[in-house]
Image: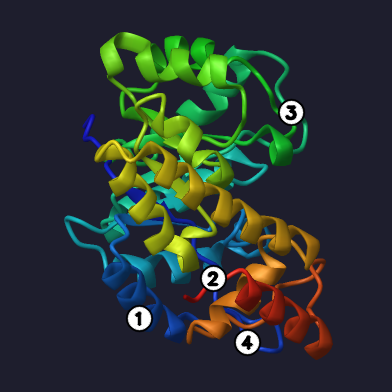
Amino acid sequence: MKKRIEGIIAAPFTPMDESGEINPSKIADYAEKLKKQGLSGVFICGTTGEGMSMTLKERKVIAKEWVNFQEEKFKVIVHVGTTSSKQSKVLAKHAQKIGAYGTSTMGPIFLKPNSINPLIDFCAEIAQAAPDIPFFYYHIPLISGINLSMVDYIDEAKLKIPNFSGIKYTHDNFAELIKCIEKDNLKWNILNGFDENLFKVLKLGLFNAVGSTYNYMCPNYLSMIKDFKAGKIEQAEEKQKKCNDIIQIILENGGPIIAGKAIMKFTGIDCGPCRIPLTKLSEKAISKLQKALNEKGLFT
């Protein structure tokens, strides 16, 4: 059960058409592109994938389509989080049934737990619906508003969640992150969730990550990791700085999801617009974004 995950995993955008309906027909080309770039898998229907904005039926359709392209070296982790553990159990059970590698959930963003044990109970109920595949907790306080100790979480999860495998750690508490990495003799899969921090976590010995910019900047990051492992530390740091400059442009032009979907169209994968309440970039804004990215050499 405690399989190791190695490499860079994309948090893919959910393809939608102009009317805001899901468009799973785009996933075949999308998956092929990510595989060719050297990605190790996908973490679907999470924040980047607008999972919370979709119905359970839609999320099942998207999950099934991605799993069609799963391979030993290209894993599919399905985010099944909702505000209801009962609904999340339905998604988790489905994920296991269709053969997904694993499931994940963040804590409930409505009626939030204020201590570890209620959070563990929430996660345990969900994880038990897919007992034969790994379960990952999705720690993302910026979105969920839940900022409890992940060291304490591991201590309780390993006792109460038999298929607990690790944490998608989307936070910048490096002192805590180190403790999670080192916990139980490096037993747990800890996945860095902030793309802009990848170089920093490489220095901590963590080479596994999940993120949105890996959809279109994966070669940059893989080159950074290669340089780091070869001892070319300055070159690796410079590549992170370039990535961070691009991330800053993205933040100034709609943010990771809105701008990210526009960027995917630049790369040949049209993921369409975002679902409301997220907005759509105007043609003028898209041109501005593309010009800024070209100036930073995103596609060179």
Q: Secondary structure at mark 1?
A: helix
Within-10-Å neighbours for mark 3: few <14, some 14–19, many 20+: some
* Residue 108 picture quarter: top right
Real-space Cα separation, disc 4 to disc 1, in angstroms = 16 Å
Q: Which residue lies at the image location 48% right of the left edge and 42% below the top edge?
A: 237
Real-space Cα separation, disc 4 to disc 2, in angstroms = 26 Å
Please tell me which of labels 4 and 3 falls first in the chain: 4
Name the residue that disc number 3 marks.
112
Q: Nearer the viewer, mark 2 or mark 3?
A: 2
Within-10-Å neighbours for mark 4: few <14, some 14–19, many 20+: some
Disc number for residue 298: 2
Evaluate whether residue 241 shows in this view.
yes
Residue 148 in the figure: left or right of residue 126? right
Name the residue that disc number 1 marks.
28
Please tell me which of labels 2 and 3 falls first in the chain: 3
Q: Amino acid at mark 4?
A: Asp
